[in-house]
Image (cartoon, grey):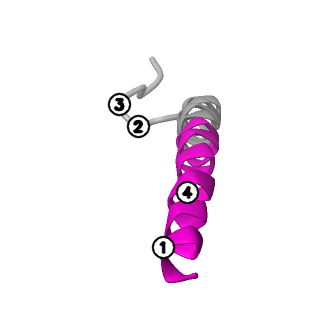
Amino acid sequence: MRNESGATALEYGLIIAATSVAILVSLQLAGDNLGVILSTISTALQ
């Protein structure tokens, strides 16, 4: 009988992949808004 109480490398890989996708999507959304914010600040300073 095998002890399956610990997480396997495959499970860790899936967690890392899901986290990476979430980070990339967040950065993509933030990047679009960041450009608008910086442009607004630049215009206000001129």
The quadrant in which residue 38 appears is: bottom right
Disc 4 to disc 3: CB gap under 8 Å: no
Cα–Cα gap, marks 4 and 3: 44 Å
Q: Secondary structure at mark 2?
A: loop
Q: Secondary structure at mark 1?
A: helix
Q: Which mark is drawn over residue 34? A: 4
Of callouts 4 and 3, the N-terminal one: 3
Q: Secondary structure at mark 4?
A: helix
Expressed as whole percent of the image width and height from the top left, the position of residue 6 reads 40, 37
Of callouts 1 and 3, the N-terminal one: 3
Which residue type does callout 2 highlight? Answer: Gly
Question: In the drawing, does residue 21 fall left or right of residue 44?
Answer: right
Cα–Cα gap, marks 2 and 4: 41 Å
Q: Which residue is mark 2?
A: 6
Cα–Cα gap, marks 2 and 1: 55 Å
Q: Which residue is mark 1?
A: 44
Of tags 1 and 4, the one toward the viewer is: 1
Disc 1 to disc 3: CB gap under 8 Å: no
Which residue type does callout 3 highlight? Answer: Ser
